[in-house]
Amino acid sequence: MTAATCLLILTDGDRVLLGRKLRGFGTGYLVAPGGHVEPGETHEEAAVRETWEETGLVASDLEPAGRVRFRFVDKATWDMDVALFRSSTWSGEPTASDELAPQWHPIDDLPLDRMWADAPHWLPTVLAGASVDLTITYAADARTILTVE
């Protein structure tokens, strides 16, 4: 099964909002706000809702930034088709939720060592204003990347 999910990359010029995942899929990793698309929602609507639920920020003026399909060799239930968005327009202040502890990080010093191994393959490109269209396959350990296509 492949879950439809979304991520929103919020920037304020020289910083990006990432958060330490506190529970659920990816606990412990730094991730962008996002999550599952609910029935009847567009990917963009889900990105706005998930960002608000996880950070307390209300994002607007979302720009599509591509797609990444994640495949897990031994964990097909983890497979995801992720729509990416970017925005530099929001209201509110980042606030921790029970799922995410948001924090601003310098774009020129990304904490890639605390993120999923796929982040270097797409995040810098999206932060530079370009779009991506990738399929990333993880090995059986769910940490090592086998292919990036």
Image (spheres, grey):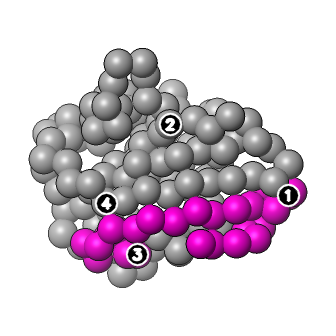
Q: In the structure shown, which secondary structural element does the residue marked by tag 4 occupy?
A: strand
Q: Residue at x 73, y 36 (%)?
A: 77
Q: CA distance from mark 2 to mark 4?
A: 16 Å
Quadrant containing the N terminus is top right
Quadrant containing the C terminus is bottom right
Query: Which of 35/44 is in front?
Result: 44
The residue sitting at the bottom extreme is 108
Q: Residue at x 57, y 35 (%)?
A: 3
Q: Which residue is mark 1?
A: 141
Q: Do labels 1 and 4 touch, CB within 8 Å?
A: no
Instruction: Return the mark for residue 65.
Output: 4
Residue 111 appears in the picture as rendered: no
Amino acid on which the number 3 mark rests in the picture: Pro
Q: In front: mark 4 or mark 3? A: 4
Label 3: few (<14), some or many (≥20) within 10 Å? some
Amino acid on which the number 1 mark rests in the picture: Asp
Q: Which residue is mark 2?
A: 4
